[in-house]
Image (cartoon, grey):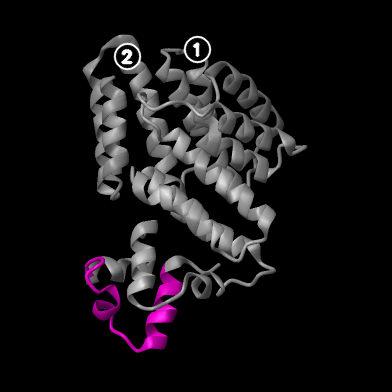
Amino acid sequence: MMKIGELLQKFRLEQGKTRKEFASDVISPSYYCKIEKGSHRVSAEDLIELLKRNNIRLSDFFGMFDSQDLAKQLNLFHEMIVAAHYNGDKDSLEKIPNLIERSLLPEEVKKEQILIARGYLEIDKSSTEPVNWKLREQLREKVFSLPNWNEEKLTLFCNLMPLYDCFSVNLIVQDILKEYKPPFSKELKRTLLGIICNNLFLKLKIGEYEGIDKLVSIADAIPSSPDLVFYKNNIIFYKNMALYKSSNATKYLKKCQKAIEICAWLGMEAYAQHMSEFLEG
């Protein structure tokens, strides 16, 4: 599956430009190099500017995907949405619905992806911004319009969990964990860990500690691997936050702080800041 960095490299080589020339003054050459190699993400805003500076039409860029292989193009948009969300980059996230609209995706798929992107914008709203209840209801209907808890439905639910109340989430997650038993596929491991992380977050947000041990136990039973580091680190954070809040023991606070440091070391400074604020709240 072609990544954003691979596509940018393809266009750069076709134009016979060095990385420094292609990056222009949009981003540093060293950062651009890491984007091509796939070790760093590019924001939607910077991607659009890079394409503009190098006279690459959006339709040409997204047209590199086989129209019959929607997964490639959908993966690109998902990568951009998730990067903007976890980096706290609201400006870039706001540009993504328009980017999807101008893509070559079929109209029905466009509508669905725009809805999901707006869902992330709704999740990232501050407490002072008005709630879009109509959008939230559309997103809930989208999840439950899918007949079975297949991987598509699980992923969609995982992404939109912060829009649900904790009581509803608890019931849904119980049903999911009853239905799915190991061994899990690689993708399912990530999704289930993501669901557990979100459930733990919602519980701790309202000070609900019942059921946390069980969720942590299920997460711990999923074998660790490099692609699961982010999720496993979050599990450690939430587990020790619950223990710290209930006991006020410094040893648990230190483990939370270490989990925050790890997130920052991984280049997710905005998310690490969010974790720190959540811990102190």
Looking at the rendered image, the quarter that the C terminus falls into is: top left
Q: Which residue is mark 1?
A: 210
Q: Secondary structure at mark 1?
A: loop
Seen in the picture, residue 41 relative to 24 is either above or below; the reply is above
Farthest bottom residue in view: 16
User: In the rendering, at what x and y percent does residue 65 appear?
Assistant: 58, 71
Residue 143 seen: yes
Which residue is the site of mark 2?
Answer: 245
The kind of residue tagged 2 is Lys
Q: Position of residue 280 (x, y in %)?
A: 25, 21
The image shows residue 106 at horizontal and vertical percentages of 67, 60
Kind of residue indicated by mark 1: Glu
Q: Residue at x 60, y 36 (%)?
A: 157
Q: Residue at x 22, y 67 (%)?
A: 28
Magenta range: 5-28
Is 178 drawn above or below residue 37 in the view shown? above
Residue drawn at x 39%, y 71% as measured from the top left: 51
Residue 112 vs residue 224, the one in the foreground: 112
The quadrant of the picture occupied by the N terminus is bottom right
What residue appears at the point 46 percent right and 53 percent down from the top-left corner?
A: 96
User: Image height check: is 145 above or below 211?
Assistant: below
Judge left or right: residue 9 versus residue 33: right
Mark earlier in primary sequence (1, 2): 1
- In percent of width and height, residue 278 lies at 31, 25
Quadrant of the rendered image containing residue 36 = bottom left
